[in-house]
Amino acid sequence: MGVIVLNLNLVVKQGDFKRNRWSNRKRLSARKSSLIRNMRLSESLKKNQLWNGIISITLLEGKNISGGSIAEIFVQLKLGDQRYKSKTLCKSANPQWREQFDFHYFSDRMGILDIEVWGKDYKKHEERLGTCKVDIAALPLKQDNCLELPLENRLGSLLVLITLTPCSGVSVSDLCVCPLADPSERKQISQRYCLQNSLKDMKDIGILQVKVLKALDLLAADFSGKSDPFCLLELGNDRLQTHTVYKNLNPEWNKVFTFPIKDIHDVLEVTVFDEDGDKPPDFLGKVAIPLLSIRDGQQSCYVLKNKDLEQASKGVIYLEMDVIYNPVKASIRTFTPREKRFVEDSRKLSKKILSRDVDRVKKITMAIWNTVQFLKSCFEWESTLRSIIAFVVISVKTKKTE
C-alpha cells in the first residue's frame, strides 16, 4: 500500500503562541458559522411566516347531507398549517352554520383548501361523512366567490363564500429598516387610519409594530448552563417568530414585527422558548400585553412569567411598541364576535403533565388511605378520647334518625 517517511525533531519552546493562535482561529470560525446559520434561519423564517392578504371563508350551509345514526355534525377546514373547526350542530340534512373564518393569504403559495364534514353519534364516536377541495389559486382576487361544493363519494354538498383580499399583512425587519422610523412612512400610515377614512375598508383597523430588542438573565435549559432562546409573538391567529440565539442567556434579537390589528381589545403574547433540536421547544417565560395599555414608542422591560401568567419566571425581556388605529373602526369591531383561534393539533404525551398527574393520584390515594385508617382507629380504641367522641356522634345521629 506504500509508506510515508517522516523526519521529526522535538524542540522545547517557551510560551504557547501557536496553540493560542489555533484556538483563536477555531473560535472565529465557530462564530462565523454561527452567524451564517442565524442569518439563514432568519431568512427562512421570514419566507415561511410572512403573508400579504386574507382569505375569508364563510361556511353557509349544507345540502342533503346523509348521516345515518349521526346525532351531531361539524366541519373542519384546513389550508396548509392553518386549521379551523366549525361549531357543532344537531343532525340535519341541511345544517345552517353561517360562520366566517379568516386564513392567511400567501401570494407565492396558495395551496388547496381541504374541507371535511364530520359527524358524532350518541356515544361521541366521530365519523367522516364526506370531503371536498378548493383550489384557492384558481379563484379571482377581491371578489365574493359563492361555491356549491359536492362531497366526494357521498351525497350532499356544502355552500361556501370565499373572498381573497390582499392587504398590508405582516412584516419582519431589522432595526435599521424599521417601518415607523421613517417620518414620511409614519405620516402615510397615520393618514390611512385617520378619522376621514373611517368608512373605508372596515376590516383594516390599524397596525401594531413590536421591536423585540433583548432578554436578560434567562433560565438555563441545557446541561451546559446555557439556552438557545427564540421569541414567538402571537396576536389573535397571527404568529411571528424571531431567529434563535445559540448558547446565550442574554440574547439580543433586534427585530421589528408588524401586525395588522383586527380587534383593539386583543392581547399581544410574547413567549420565549429554548430550541431543542427536533424535540418540542422548552418554555422559558411569557408576557401578555393588552393593546390598549401600550405606550407608543417607549422601551419597556417586562418580567417573564409562567404559562398561566400567575407567577414570575426567571428573566426579563425588553420591547418597544407602537399602535396606530382608527377609533371608529375599532369601536364598530367591538360589537362583532371575536375571531376564533385556529384548531390546534392534538398535543403529544408530555412527561411533565404525566408526572404531575401521577403525583395528584398519589396524593388523593394517600388522603383516602389516611381517612380510612382514621375511621378504623375510632372503633378500635387506639385513642380513648377519639373513640368516645365517635361513639357520642354516632349515638346522636341514630337518635335523630329515629
Image: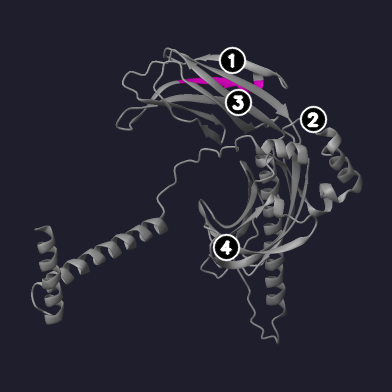
> How far across and down, in percent of the image, does residue 1 sit?
52, 56
What kind of residue is marked 4?
A: Lys
Q: Which residue is mark 2?
A: 199
Q: Amino acid at mark 3?
A: Ile
Res 147 label: 1
Q: Which mark sits nearer the N-terminus, 2 or 4?
A: 2
Q: How far apart are the two marked residues, 1 and 2, measured between alpha carbons?
A: 29 Å
Residue 75 painted magenta: no
Q: Quadrant of the C terminus?
A: bottom left
**Closer to viewer: mark 2 or mark 4:** 2
According to the picture, the residue beneath numbered tag 4 turns out to be 305
Dominant secondary-structure state across the stretch colored magenta: strand
**Marks 2 and 3, the one that precedes in the sequence:** 3
Q: Please determine whether, in this image, residue 239 is positioned above or below residue 335.
A: below
Q: Which residues are magenta?
A: 131-137
Residue at the spot of label 3: 57
Label 2, label 3: how far apart the Cα atoms are: 23 Å
Name which residue lies at 11% across and 79% down.
382
| Earlier sequence position, callout 1 versus callout 2 | 1
Q: Is residue 62 visible?
A: yes
The residue that appears at 10% across and 63% down in the rendered structure is: 399
